Image (cartoon, rainbow, N blue to C red):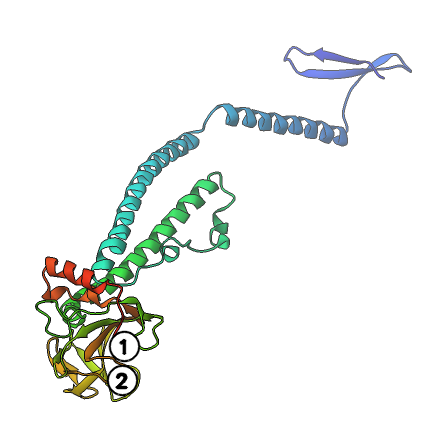
Amino acid sequence: MHSILIIYTTIMIKIKYKLNKENLKYEKFTRTRFEWLIRSLGIFSILIISSFLLYIIVSNFFDTPKEKQLKREISNYELHFQLLNAKFQNLEKVVDNLEYRDENIYRIIFEAEPIPSGIRNAGYGGVEKYKNLEGYNNSRLIIKTTKKIDKLSKKLYILSKSFDDISKLATNKEEMLASIPAIQPISNKNLTRISSGFGWRIHPIYKVPKFHDGQDFTAPRGTDIYATGNGTIVEVHYSRRGYGNKIIIDHGFGYKTLYAHLSKFYVKKGQKIKRGEAIGTVGNTGLSTAPHLHYEVIRKGQHVNPINYFHNDLSPEDYEKVIILAEQANQSLD
């Protein structure tokens, strides 16, 4: 390798010389263009690497003004999120309270069918609905909050529809109260005409236990029978079997009443009727062992105990007596 001598002139210009071993003289050292290119690239690479390392060090340990601003904004967002989450929890409590009142007060008062809990508390959307929220630092929190908001939105929608139904029922409440069976079908001031009640009774002819779907009232032949609620006569049927001559009234709102073993009809099919209006007379037709009225209340296709629908013309004391009389395990009259 050639020795290189560096000489500084009086004006501080660095000049390089190398020793020529053949003639033992120093000759002026000059680089080729390629050597200059390689040298320049080396210096440039060192500058790039140094700058990159400096950037890494500065970015890890020191925040830029923009980063400081973003961190302040994130901190503010976190605070607002906590406040919104607290408000959201309070809103959930309000909705839960509205649900309770809707299910246990309003719908009971207006005799509306309960909304199944599976519908009230059902989820909203599937897994794919929240896929676009994945991949962020706070994806889990964002997805959880979004699900809660969607669930609350669905609850509010169901509540809104339920209140629409309740509003319609409230509008028709006066008509409903006038239509639902609420009095005894014959005059029975002394409560002496209550006979076989709703439940298992001994059949008067076959002498075997048989479920009695209605309430029997003993009364002389020709005693007037009254409609127990407003409605429409949907059946006027003459027969010598079973119920004998019978009338069925459709009161709307899911209620029907049946009056059996009649001797005479005052009404015809399709006729509108008011509560307390006479529709026929007591008889002994069909499968009956004595003059009486067999009376049934049918709600949404199911037979229910008629004594629960005598409240309009009885005092609390008389109502208790009716319950006792109707529950006596005796033989039915039909």
- Please, is residue 30 above or below residue 262 in the view? above
Between 170 and 57, the one nearer to me in the picture = 170
Q: Secondary structure at mark 2?
A: loop
Provide residue 75's location: percent of width, then percent of height: 37, 32
Residue 248 visible in image: no
Q: Residue at x 82, y 14 (%)?
A: 3
What residue would you read off at disc 2? 286
Between 102 and 83, the one nearer to me in the picture = 102
Dot 2 or dot 1, earlier in sequence: 2
Query: Do labels 2 and 1 touch, CB within 8 Å?
Result: yes
In the rendered image, the quadrant that contains the C terminus is bottom left
Q: Which amino acid type is shown beneath numbered disc 2? A: Gly
Q: Residues within 10 Å of mark 1 (few under 14, many from 20)?
A: many
What residue would you read off at disc 1? 334
Q: Quadrant of residue 9?
A: top right
- Please, is residue 124 above or below residue 11 in the view? below
In the picture provided, is 147 more to the left or to the right than 27?
left
Q: Quadrant of residue 180?
A: bottom left
Provide residue 278's location: percent of width, then percent of height: 11, 81
Q: Which mark is residue 256?
A: none
Provide residue 231's location: percent of width, then percent of height: 18, 78
Q: Which amino acid type is shown beneath numbered disc 1? A: Asp
Between 123 and 169, the one nearer to me in the picture = 169
Marks 2 and 1, how far apart in space?
9 Å
Q: Residue at x 33, y 40 (%)?
A: 85
Q: Secondary structure at mark 1?
A: loop
Q: Residue at x 9, y 60 (%)?
A: 315
Residue 7 visible in image: yes
Between 246 and 56, the one nearer to me in the picture = 246
